[in-house]
Image: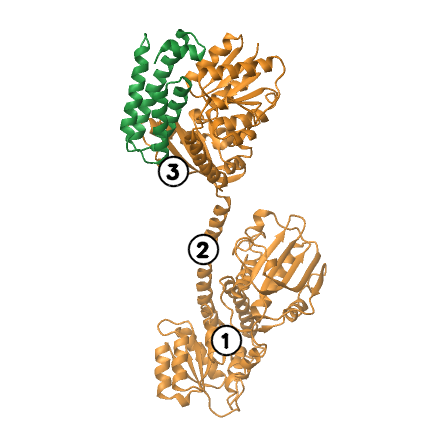
Amino acid sequence: VNLDDHAARAGLSAGQYASLLEMFVRATENDMTRLRSALSASQLERAAEIAHHIKGAAFSLELEDISEAAKTLETRARKGVCPDAGELTDRLSAGLASVRRILPGM
Amino acid sequence: MKTILVVDNHPVMLEFMARLLEEQGHEVLTAQDGLAALDILESRTPDILFIDLVMPNIDGRMLCRIIRRRPGLNQSTLIVLSAIAAEQPDALTELDADAVIAKGPLQKMRSHVLEIVDRVERGGMTRHPDEIHGLGDVHARHITKELLSVKEHFQLVLDGMSEGMVELAEEDRIVYANPAAAAMIGRSPEEVLGIAFPRVFEVPHRSAVSEALARIAQTASAPGGEGSTLPDVREPKLIVELGGRETELLFCPINGERAAVLVLLEDISERTRYERRLEEIRRLESVGNLAAGVAHDFNNILMAIQGNASLMLLDVSSSHPHHERLSMIQKQVDAARGLTNQLLGYARKGRYHVEVLDLNTVVLNALEGFGQEREDIEIRTGLADDLERIEGDLGQITQVLVNLLGNAAESMTRGGIIGVSTRNTTESEISSKLYEPVAGRYVMLEVTDSGGGMDEQTRSRIFEPFFTTKERGRGSGLGLAAADGMVKAHNGYIEVESELDHGSAFKVFLPAATLDEEKAPERAKKRATAAPREKRTVLLVDDQETILRVGRDLLEALGYETLTAASGAEAVEIFERCPRDVDLVLLDIVMPGMSGGEVFDRLRAVNPDTKVLLSSGYSIEGEVERILERGANGFIQKPFSLRTLEQAVTSVIGKPERGAGQGNES
């Protein structure tokens, strides 16, 4: 993730965009906790809703890796079969970590 | 400058929109869900509202509907800002939004949002609910569509449920109500959203609901209470009144990521009414059994009194000082017999002689002796010429009519009009909701009066035994209860319509006859009299020693030789020894051990021509009828007088040559 490029594409200053990313990271970390809890309890409907929530914001922020992983997870959870849930949550975590790395304050 | 409300459940979207619009000099209000938005709208009226569709606690669709229907807000510009816009554009028209923006990358959304706000500021905003801004910026994500279709499926199920369902969020506020729940509450689904659930109930019931919800909240916050979405039904069902109806509430807490409670509402008014009625029927049935038992025992006692009085009257002349007292005893026994007959009628017993009857004739005969003491009552009749026949016990049908007429007369203390009418009808006219009347042709007897009528409370109890509005000592409170029992014993129905100060109308529905009209006379033929001969023997069978003694004395007083048996087995034994010596068996049908019916069959097996006259204090579930059907020659109800006994016995086997009844019984 290139902070300046993303900020420019969003029509925001780098600082403004970074501020939104920080907010996204915090919200998504919370979502990830809820997501893992839902998956471990085999509550796929709930997992799908959380993935949907992550996916929408990631898409708006143009965080494609996160958006795609969330979308796949949502699709499978909605169908009631999600054998690679662990791999997908790992991809989400990895994407989130890469965002975190470019944020100076985090 | 405009006041703008943004409703979205993602903090990034709220932050982005707030910064964007504040930079343009607008006042921005934000809410993370529909419930929070409703709170803001209580005190603020934004010029523009941006609303996401997928949100917890009242979703965007419902919020749009509420906004459009709320006075003061319908002039605000309503913009839907949602990812769903890309998947289900057709479904957005119904939202009645001024514009729709598909969520996409920030810079695209930025331009669409600013363009619309600018148009509103310049007054150039025209409504285009089916035009979606930013549709080209996103790729259709079918998963969202799938998600919505699943939700729509559940929505259809919830919409079609007859039970109400509400979802409560924080502070017990309603965030969802299906149509059934809204109807129970008495408002539209949009109107109930955001209201604290206990407040939809009348004040006396609020605390019970609040306390139940508090207990659930306590349980949910207890260790181990989290992480489950399974309904916790430990909170017992609560029955409260809602909109004047008895309503059962079932609380299903969802201890998930946010505190929520689902409440199922079921209108149980009808069910409760039915259960209460059923309970009442069972209670009355047990009272009926008690009444029948008491009547039976009383009739046996009365039989002994009646028999002894009859025998004593044989020995005293009319000038004897005891003659009048003995006659008085007989009259009192008659009165007591009337009372036991009412008791038996209430208990649905005592339907002995079923024959084909013309109800009009029964009415005319009953009216002949009625009302002679009440000149202030006018009787108007309307009897159908083509009235179908009924099957019934003449004594009981007459008693039903007499009781209804008596009730009507008593309700008109200052005189008035009694109407008696008959007509043919069908089950469709029977209006009671408590039972499903048997389909078919019915004959209806209606007795109306212009008396004081009854209020609902009295009307609901009039068929209860011993219920009376009269002062103690006047009236037994059995008349209508007995009429009800007798009608039911005839497979009929009785209904009452009444209003205070507007008189009453009792309708009796009796099934039209299916029996051959000639049947009853055929039965009578069985009683063909025999020629007198010197000696006639009666075998008297009864388990009551007193009855045996008085019965034997009565029969001997009438000139019959009498054998007695204290049980069915003894009767069969005596009869088998000398079947040809017994001219008539006077058989009690309610006995311990071998029943009357069994004795009858055993006797007939020995001698098919045996004459049998049945006798009882009451009939068990049509036992008399069944034995009569099998060929018994008649029935005599206890207590019977010497005259009645003489008539009954004579009609079957004729008089003994020595004759009897020479005494002074009257």
Tell me: residue B288, above or below residue A17.
below
> Residue tagged by mark 2?
B282
Q: Chain drawn orange, letter?
A: B
Q: Secondary structure at mark 1?
A: strand
Closer to the camera: disc 3 or disc 2?
3
**Mark 1: amino acid:** Ile
Q: Chain of mark 3?
A: B
**Mark 2: amino acid:** Arg
Question: On the image, which quarter does residue A92 sit in?
Answer: top left
Closer to the camera: disc 3 or disc 1?
3
- In the rendered structure, the colour chosen for chain A is green
Tag 3 and tag 2 share a subunit: yes
**Mark 3: amino acid:** Pro
User: What's the coloring here?
Assistant: by chain
Lateral position of residue B506 relative to residue B618, left or right: right
Closer to the camera: disc 1 or disc 2?
2
The 10 Å Cα crowd at callout 1, few under 14, some 14 to 19, many 20 or more, is: many
User: Disc number at residue B236?
Assistant: 3
Relative depth, front residue between B192 and B370: B192
The 10 Å Cα crowd at callout 3, few under 14, some 14 to 19, many 20 or more, is: few
Q: What is the spatial separation of the Cα atoms under label 3 and label 2, in whole angstroms?
A: 27 Å
The 10 Å Cα crowd at callout 2, few under 14, some 14 to 19, many 20 or more, is: few
Question: On the image, which quarter does residue B227 sit in?
Answer: top left
